[in-house]
Image (spheres, rainbow, N blue to C red):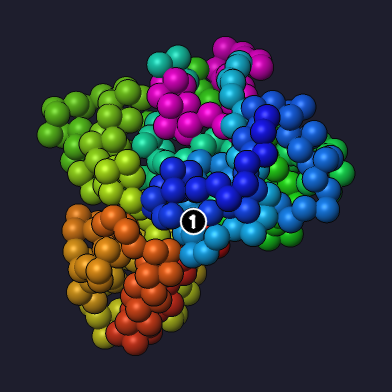
Amino acid sequence: MEIQTNFSLKNYNTFGIEAKAKQFVAVHSIAELKTVLEENKSQKKFILGGGSNMLLTQDIDALVIHVDLKGKKIIKDDDNFVWVESQAGENWHEFVLWTIDQNFGGLENMSLIPGNVGTTPVQNIGAYGTEIKDTFVSCEAMAIENQKTKTFSKDECHFGYRESVFKNEAKDQYIITSVVFKLTKRNHKINISYGDIAAQLSNKNIQIPTLKDVSNAVIAIRTSKLPDPKELGNSGSFFKNPILLKSDFEKIHQQFPEMKYYDISPTEVKVPAGWLIEQAGFKGKRFGDAGIHKNQALVLVNYGNATGQEILDVSKTIQETIFKTFGIHIEAEVNVI
């Protein structure tokens, strides 16, 4: 466990942005994490997981701690369910595929989401009708200040749409070290409510889909729409889908009757941010080495040597245009550093 100085983070963020860490250390065990925190109490710290949900706009003047804890295990099960614990440094997609191989259900709709397991509760990640909170039981976290461990229950995480306690009240206070999920062993709740998945299965003539079938459909959809970060720097969806009060939305909808939307409660609707961005003419546009992906307007990309600031400037232009055009504010899902 060696602390390195002036360390390049280009390979540690999925945008592929060149930025330097003042100091950098990778930890591979709870003991190492505790030691680093104890021995560097006065140091400013930055916690790094899979680097998939951040945009680096500057060098990081801090000790960057890369959480690389590995391992997964079944901690208990009964006839219908299994409780699986994964360490924070496990790759999310590989973990999802492992659960499917065991015939454990609940995570298949979130196949191919970039990043590591430890950061999934922070964002309450989700895709195609499912979110982490649907299967989340608890997570272990270490307090940065005093290295004490705490178990956060589902209720204590205060999950919302791409929200959690770790983005709000507990921000920058804890490092998640492991997560426990409760998954089905049988009577799986197959969720194909999103049209893209149903269409993909129909094309394959699959009428009674398995967990693997759903996962494969999601992978095919995401692959067709989303670039591989190893080939084209990106962070997946850059923006959240805005949630509007129905009363506000109805006024906007009168002006734009073709606007797509989904009812999410008796009083709220969700509008696809990708549709708004595409209608505003940004899909496939390029501004130097920063741009918007040609197949998915929600995805901002680095074509090679874009800086984080250049990508941020593009995102702000999109936000301003959407607000001027539709009167809707779209928020960044990605953490801007």
Q: Write the residue at 24% across / 76% down.
A: 280
The quadrant of the picture occupied by the C terminus is bottom right
Quarter of the view holding residue 70: top right
Mark 1 neighbour density, 10 Å: few (under 14) some (14–19) many (20 or more): many
The location of residue 240, given as percent across then percent down, is 43, 62
Along the horizontal axis of the image, is 110 left or right of 179? left
Q: Residue 108's x, y, as percent?
A: 40, 31
- Quarter containing the N terminus: top right
Left or right: 32 as drawn, with respect to 28:
right
Rendering coords of residue 158 (x, y %): 67, 52
| Secondary element at tag 1 | loop
Relative to 317, is 162 above or below?
A: above
What residue sits right under mark 1 in the picture? 19
Q: Is residue 171 visible?
A: yes
- Residue type highlighted by circle 1: Ala
Up-down relation of residue 73 to residue 227 (above or below): above
Seen at 43% across and 64% down, the residue is: 308
Q: Is residue 127 left or right of residue 172?
A: left
Taking 128 as reference, is 150 left or right?
A: right
Seen from the viewer's position, the closer of residues 272 and 295 is 295
Q: From what the image shows, is residue 216 above or below residue 123?
A: above
Magenta residue span: 75-100
Name the quadrant containing residue 112.
Answer: top left
Q: Can you tell which quarter of the image residue 252 is in?
A: bottom left
Residue 245 spot, x, y in % from top left = 47, 74
Circle count: 1
Q: Report the front residue among 258 and 274.
A: 274
- At horizontal 38% and vertical 82% (from top left) the residue drawn is 320
Q: Nearer the viewer, residue 261 or 18?
A: 18
